[in-house]
Amino acid sequence: MLQHDELFEWRTIYHNVLLGLEVQHMLSAKTKARAHELLDIYGLKNFEKSHPSELSGGMRQRAALIRTLVLEPDILLLDEPFSALDYQTRLTVGDDIGQIIRQEEKAALLVTHDLSEAVSLADRVIILSGRPASIRQTIPLIFSLEQDTPLNRRNSPEFKNYFNLIWKELNCDE
């Protein structure tokens, strides 16, 4: 999942979701049904026939994630997936996508420069050095929340501690 949703305007949301299946010659009645199911589960069923310009930025990112999930990947790579969104949308979509990844029980690698995003979405943060990059530190993130969601994490006492720990590590001399 890239920084921009890369949806094609001339295709409906449903047909954008099918694109990866078409390219990989995996289009079948079963995969089409799965696409419909994912659109329904994640709130885009009523927008299947819409075009990307008719959706909000958050809805477009959800469609892009569904396009990825329908391929049944073992791992998701999220490369700054929220950077093109305004702050409020970024929080909402981050929460949505974090919960979708958990519901789908997918492993995901999130590349981000946003510390708050990393702490709210991850189960561990891997801090890299400058070029050539190497792993400087791995910080496991454990929250004592009844409902562990990205938005709830931002209000937890652990959030500030993890944020400060990562900030300090990023700004120490190598």
Image (cartoon, grey):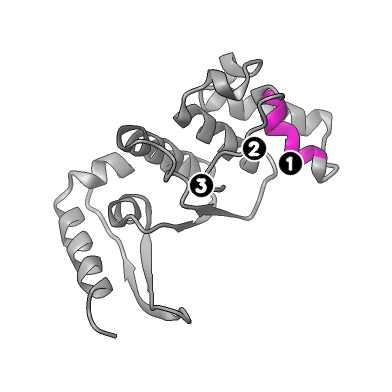
Residue 56, position in %: x, y? 47, 24
Residue, disc 1: 20
- At x 52%, y 33%, the residue is 62
Residues 82 and 28: in front is: 82
Residue 22 drawn above or below residue 11? below
* Type of amino acid under label 3: Gln
Residues 120 and 107: in front is: 120
- The rendered magenta stretch, by its main secondary structure, is classed as helix
- At x 46%, y 51%, the residue is 80
In the figure, residue 15 lies in which quadrant?
top right
Q: Secondary structure at mark 2?
A: helix
Q: Is residue 16 magenta?
A: yes
Residue found at the far bottom of this picture: 174
Residue found at the far left of this picture: 157
> How crowded is the residue under tag 1: few (<14 C-alpha within 10 Å), some, or many (20+)?
some
- Look at discs 2 and 3 and give the one toward the viewer: 3
Quarter of the image with the C terminus in it: bottom left
Residue, disc 3: 3
Residue 144 drawn above or below residue 124? above
Residue 120, position in %: x, y? 31, 50
Left or right of residue 3: residue 83: left
> How crowded is the residue under tag 3: few (<14 C-alpha within 10 Å), some, or many (20+)?
some
Q: Label 2, label 1: how many angstroms apart (C-alpha)?
A: 7 Å
Magenta segment range?
14-22
Labelled disc at residue 67: 2
Residues 84 and 115: in front is: 84
Q: Label 1, label 3: how many angstroms apart (C-alpha)?
A: 17 Å
Residue 108, position in %: x, y? 51, 55
Q: Is residue 19 magenta?
A: yes
Q: Earlier in the sequence, mark 2 or mark 3?
A: 3
Q: How many marks?
A: 3
